[in-house]
Amino acid sequence: MKRNNKFSFVIGPPQNSWVRVALKLDDFELNFVASNIPENPVEKLAESLILLAAGDKGSTVVTWNLEPNCCHFEISAYSRDTIGLRIFESVSESMQGKEILVALGSFNEILCPFYRSVKLFESLIQSENDWVKIPKSTLNKLTGIFKDRKGS
């Protein structure tokens, strides 16, 4: 398992229900274009971050639809501050595919870059035709949990 040193995650501005996604971890780079069909992966990521940042052990999967392939992010909380990230590529929504990254890091190293990217992405949405915004209640809950964690 790769220990995280430098992790970055960026979701580009949406266009016609598509977004560019860039993930970098040390010398590993993953770039793809994903759609919000059949579900909004950014909203699913926000919901996953809420669950994982709450401090409970657990695991969530966010599927990015690349049409026809998929990219799955399995994010796991092994403890309050030990976070795992596994990334798979597959030809369907099934997780059965090729594992391309396994990483381990802290709350600040793994979850915070995802959080910052979700927050920035929401500010880039200009039209509901391009991408549907995450419900305000979900964003407020996400922001509250991350502020509480950063303050503790």
Image (cartoon, rainbow, N blue to C red):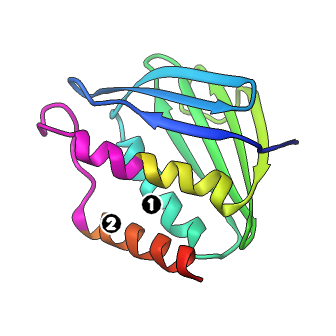
For residue 47, the mark is 1
Residues shaded magenta: 118-136
Q: Picture coordinates of residue 138 (x, y %)?
A: 33, 66
Q: Quadrant of residue 55 in the image?
A: bottom right
Q: Quadrant of the C terminus?
A: bottom right
Under tag 1, what secondary structure? helix
What is the crowding at mark 2: few (fewer than 14 residues within 10 Å), some, or many (at least 20)?
some
Disc 1 vs disc 2: Cβ atoms closer than 8 Å? yes
| Camera-side residue of 23 and 36 | 23
Q: Residue at x 31, y 70 (%)?
A: 140
Q: Position of residue 144 (x, y in %)?
A: 40, 76
Residue at the extreme bottom of the image, as rendered = 152
Specify the amino acid type for callout 2: Thr
How many marks do you count on the picture? 2
Decide if residue 12 is on the left or right side of residue 116. left
For this orientation, the residue located farthest to the top is: 68
Q: Is residue 98 magenta?
A: no
Tell me the amino acid under the disc marked 1: Glu
Q: What number is the disc on residue 137?
A: none
The residue where tag 2 is placed is 138
Residue 106 falls left or right of residue 14:
right
* Residue in front for this viewpoint, 39 or 152: 152
Give the SS element for disc 2: helix
Looking at the image, residue 107 sits to the left or right of residue 22; the answer is right
